[in-house]
Amino acid sequence: MGLDLMLFMADWEQLSAVPVDKRIDALDDTTRPLELDGQYPVQRYGTTCGWLWLPDRESAWCAEYEFHTTTGSYSPHYRAGHAWDEMRPFASASVRAEMDTFLDGLIWDADPANDPSLTGGGGFFPPATDRGGPRVLLVCPPEAVPGKARAWERAKPHLEELRGPFAAECEGWAGFPDTFEDFTALLDEWGDVTAEAARRGWGLVGLP
């Protein structure tokens, strides 16, 4: 998986006003406007990663998130989704239901036919028509975000139940997270992402 992941939180009303075929460019151009001559026009808060905002944050309608637990590569997210796919048959029914709700459409697809890179996120973005065309890695509309944030809140206290399934199905194998702690740390960041997007009523978009 040589892809990177640029994750955006966006005001869907503002993004919907942009023509469908220009929405991918709008996200990238808004967080990295060309008129700033290559300077990265964001303000970071908390640590060196996290949410990245334009200098005029009050009027910003989207922000980019940089993960603390990755170097920008999509591979850790793919590996975490792969790990969940292998572990889920061994999880309790309640934990499986919450994790399915949380992860589906973010880093794991319950139905691969709904892959946003093929469908354009249900038509909100243009589907990829060729290998060189613009595409998306994930699309989570604002109406779906609060349910994911709540599912994570319910699942998080029970993550220790997954340590055994992780050790049995994932640990030590290529293509999976290196450790259970790596797996849960990445999911915790996704929990923070969904919580902030839910608080604002915004959606999430992942671009390669």
Image: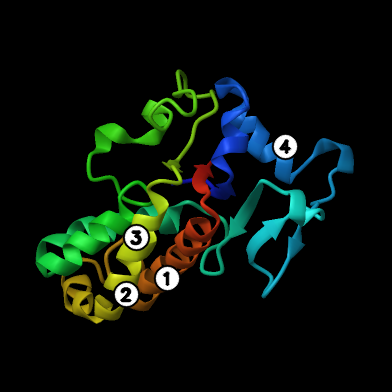
The answer to the question of whether label 4 and label 1 lie on touching residues, with beta carbons closer than 8 A, is no
Q: Amino acid at mark 2?
A: Lys
Q: Is residue 111 left or right of residue 72?
A: left
Nearest the camera: 52 or 132? 52
Marking on residue 188: 1
Query: Mark 3 to mark 4: distance in Å?
Result: 29 Å
Q: Is residue 146 visible?
A: yes
Q: Residues within 10 Å of mark 1 (few under 14, many from 20)?
A: some
Q: Quadrant of residue 155?
A: bottom left
Query: Mark 2 to mark 4: distance in Å?
Result: 35 Å
Q: Is residue 39 left or right of residue 58?
A: right
Q: Which residue is mark 4?
A: 29
Q: Which residue is mark 3?
A: 80
Check the image and report above or below for 57 versus 2. Answer: below
Comes first in the chain, label 3 or label 1: 3
Q: Which residue is mark 2?
A: 156
Labels in figure, total: 4
